[in-house]
Image (cartoon, rainbow, N blue to C red):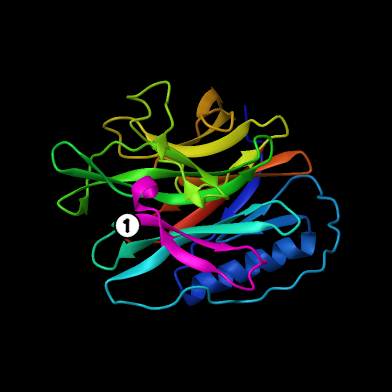
Amino acid sequence: MIQPRSLRVIRLLCDNSLKTARRIWNAFTDLLAIGSLVLIPRTVLLAESPQPALKSIAFDIQLDTISSGFDKQSCWVHPRAGAIPGQTPIVVLTMQKAAIVGSDIFGPLNEMRTDNLGKSWTGPIEHASTLGLREEPDAITIAPSDFWPKWHAKSGKLLGIGHNVRYQNNKVMPIRRRETIFSIYDPDQRSWTHWEELAMPDVDKFYGAGAGCVQRLDLPDGDILLPIYFAPKGAKLTCVIVLRCGFDGQRLSVKEMGNELHLDTDRGLGEPSLTCFNDRYYVTMRNGCRPTGQTIRTLLSA
C-alpha cells in the first residue's frame, strides 16, 4: 500500500559531544546549500527531487499554562488536542498522569476543554469509568495510554486512538499482549465511550501491536491510514506497518495492511506517525537505543 521510495537519509545522534555537534552542523549546512530538504527532530532527510516552494502563512505562537501543580508523585504526560469544527471550534485535550517512580505507570485519561479558542479551559476531568484502568485475571491491570484525539470529518466524530499497557504488581509486564484502542467523544455530554480494542487479523503475529503516540491520516472517503508498531509473540524487536482502517462512526476495523518496515537493531522501530504533502506520504518512526537511551527518528516517503 505504501512503498518507500529511494531516499538519502542522514541520521544524527545527539549525544551532546562536540564532535557530534560539528558533524550535525556540517551536514545541516551542506544540505541547506542544496535546498529542498525536510527536517524532523534528530533526522535530516534530502529528497531526490526538488520540492515546490511553500506559501508563507501568518501565524502567532502563544504559550499558556492550562494546568499546574506538582505533587512529587506523578506528572502529566501525553497532552494532545483534537478540534471539533464549528463557528467557534471546540478543542478537547487528553492527558494522563504517570508515576514518577517506575516507568510507564499510567493512570486514567483526563480531559481539558476550551470552547473559546483557549481563552479559558475547563478540567482536568478524569474519565475513569470509560478511559480508566481495568482488571484482568492473574492480578493483571490494563490501562489505556499514548492516546491521540483527532476529528474524523466523514463521520463527524472526534475519534481518539492509542494503545494499552499491562501491569502486574504495579510494574509493566516484560512479556505482555498489547492492542490498539479507540474511543469516541460526545461533545454535548462531555463524555467518552468505553475504550475498545481494534481486532487484528492474526493474533500471534500482532501479539504486541499498538498505535501509541501515533499521528494518523484520514482519507477523503473516510478510511483511515493508521501506522502501528508490533512484535509477534516471542519477538524482541518491533516493526512498523500502516493499516487502512474503516470507521463508521462507532467501530474501527482493519481493511488492508501495507508492507512491514524493519530495523534489526536495539528495539526496532516504534511510534510511527504519518502525513501527506503534495501527494507524497511521509512516515516518521522512532528507534530507542539501549543502554544509552538515545533516540533516532527516521523519515521515509512513499
Q: Is disc 1 placed on a helix, strand or loop?
A: strand
Residue 52 appears left or right of 255? right
Badge 1: residue crowd in 10 Å (few <14, some 14–19, many ≥20): many
Residue 218 in the image: state x and y as whole percent. 65, 38
Closer to us: 13 or 85 = 85
Nearer to the camera, 39 or 34: 39
Q: Quadrant of the C terminus?
A: top right
Task: Between residue 210 and residue 12, name the one nearer to us.
Answer: 210
Q: Position of residue 82 (x, y in %)?
A: 59, 53
Q: Is residue 200 found inside the magenta-colored segment of the image? A: no
Left or right of 19 on screen, residue 71: left
> In the picture, which quadrant includes the N terminus?
top right
Q: Which residue is mark 1?
A: 107
Q: Is residue 61 above or below residue 105?
A: below
Q: In the rendered view, would you say 199 is above or below 85?
A: above
Q: Is residue 294 above or below residue 252?
A: below
Q: Is residue 90 left or right of residue 57?
A: left
Q: Hey, which residue is sitting farthest front in the picture?
A: 189
Residue shown at 73%/56% (left/top)?
Answer: 37
| Residue 30 left/right relative to 259 | right
Residue 247 image point, x, y percent: 58, 30
Q: Position of residue 146 (x, y in %)?
A: 43, 51
Note whether residue 7 is visible: yes
Give the magenta part as a residue range: 108-131
Residue at horizontal 86%, vertical 55%?
53
Residue 144 visible at all = no
Residue type highlighted by circle 1 = Gly
Q: Residue at x 52, y 54 (%)?
A: 297
Q: Quadrant of residue 64?
A: bottom right
